Amino acid sequence: MQQRSKKLIVIISICCTTILLLSCRNDKESDRDHLVFRYNEHGNIPTLDPAFARNPQAIWPDNQLYNGLVQLDDSLNIEPDIAKSWIINDSTNTYTFFLRNDVFFHQNKAFAQKGLHNPTRYTRKVVAQDFVYSFDRLTDEKVASSGSWVMNYVESYKAENDTTLVIQLKQPFPAFLGLLSMRYCSVVPKEAVEYYGNEFRRNPVGTGPFQFKMWEENVKLVFRKNPLYFERDESGNRLPYLEAVSITFLPDKQSEFLQFAQGKLDFISGLDGSYKDELLTTHGQLQPKYKHLAYMITSPYLNTEYLGFFLGTNTPEIQSKTLRQAINYGFDREKMVTYLRNGMGIPAIHGFIPKGLPGYAEIDGYSYEPEKAKQLIEQYKIETGDAKPEITIGTNSQYLDLCEYVQRELEKLGIAVTIDVMPPSTLRQMKSSGELDIFRASWIADYPDAENYLSLFYSPNFTPNGPNYMHFKNEVFDSLYVKSLSISNIDERKLLYTKMDSIIVEEAPIVPLFYDMAVRFVNKKVSGLGINPQNFLVLKHVKKSK
């Protein structure tokens, strides 16, 4: 009996010790939680090589790992990054960049020399030749970068010395500095790319505020603070403030929202139908029951949602400008944004260029005018002899509610509408190959200049050569577009942009639906996150309270 009691005491002691250790570990994890920023990526991250940073899933983590010559602030102003200054010679289209001399690549064994005992400590400074190498990768057919088009405007580039890089363009392109802010133009070290080969995609080495730690694909990705990062805050403190970034990969947005509601994620981005009514009122305010947990930040987002008409078809409804205008007048964009987006959007009644860009103007676009739409429909019937106009809209399930709203409103006016729902990949392929008379699409800015939006209507850009999915052609538009490329003064360029946008409104090759809003729901412990019109994630200024 006494021996059994001793055994029981030992078991209880072991259990108590285990509980104490677990408690201590949990306390330690809790103590350090304010140093880790956690977010979820519901899409897949295929690579961490910036030469393939073509969508937000890749751009967000790449923003933490890499730097380029220039960067954008939250107001889309171009600021120095690795280039501390630059000179532009308009007469020769030459850009001369002067680089900082205190930027180091992440510490990595790729820089190790034989015989060193602790090779992971080693790194080296970034020099101008590293940008030459990085730009060479973009145009290398063997690399097959999705960002190769960025170099289409460039005639040559060279390193004059370690801190001077000269880039000469083929022709004037005023948006070039904005183009260089893209993650495609990040600097990478030759040593790491050659050391890891094809595995550089999952062993990234950059210069950013965070460096790669571990990646279990589709499960978890972790970055740690870069102790050598060159940027400092206004008080001279080295950035970043956080110790780590942890990314999970829950594919379901409802699960992502539940994790956020439980405080296990620090923010969620965007407005998904599975939780929009739970989080927001119909007027776009945060629901009272979540105000203790989170705050909301919004910004105009450089994304225009639209319906496109493929003008290469012989379908009479699509060829008729009269009917295209009737469709534009035939539904209430204000009501659509209020009830289907909980107010998170700006009705697209001022053309194609979205709010937030120079060139967005208070031009008269299409507002809701049902009587005018009816008159235009009758005019179409007289012009064509088509008594029963019918259209088909191709979309994916994510935007079905928007298309069904347009369908209901147009059918009240006498236009029969069929909605063809398909997977996103099928929609992209059929849109590019001209197999859809009308398609739902969006255009998110590659770089912050309205030229990027207007390029969709420049006739040499007919797909597959460019993004003119509508196969729209207008000689006056084309001449204005070409002229705008030679004007460096943004105020003068804006006047041409407005004229081009007015032509798009008049000819109606598209139906602008709304200009998007970037929206973030952020845990109250987080400060310094900010938001920008490209909805890029920048974490170097973020702090978390305990």
Image: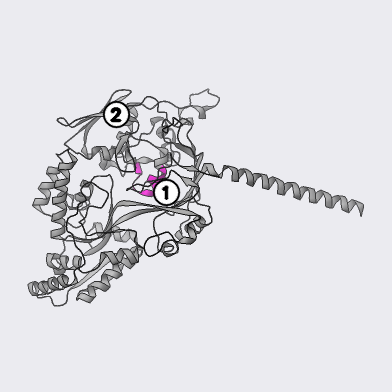
Which residue is outermost to the bottom? 387
Residue at image position (48%, 37%) is 241
- Which label was assigned to residue 90? none
Disc 1 versus disc 2: distance between alpha carbons? 33 Å
* Residue nearer the viewer, 264 or 189: 264
The boundaries of the magenta stretch are: 51-61
Residue at image position (47%, 49%) is 39
Query: Residue 64 location, x and y as percent?
Result: 42, 40
Compared with 194, 485 (above or below) is below
Residue at image position (48%, 57%) is 291
SS type, badge 2 = strand
Q: What residue sits right under mark 1 in the picture?
A: 45
- Which label was assigned to residue 85? 2
Q: Earlier in the sequence, mark 1 or mark 2?
A: 1
Quadrant into which the C terminus falls: top right
SS type, badge 1 = loop
* Residue nearer the viewer, 308 or 71: 71
Q: Is residue 480 left or right of residue 410?
A: left
Amino acid marked by disc 2: Ser
Query: Residue 97 location, x and y as percent?
Result: 28, 28
Quadrant into which the N terminus falls: bottom right
Q: Magenta-highlighted stretch: main secondary structure? A: helix
Compared with 537, 474 (above or below) is below
Number of numbered tags placed on the structure image: 2
Q: Give the colour scheme of this rendering.
A: one colour
Q: Is residue 507 visible?
A: yes
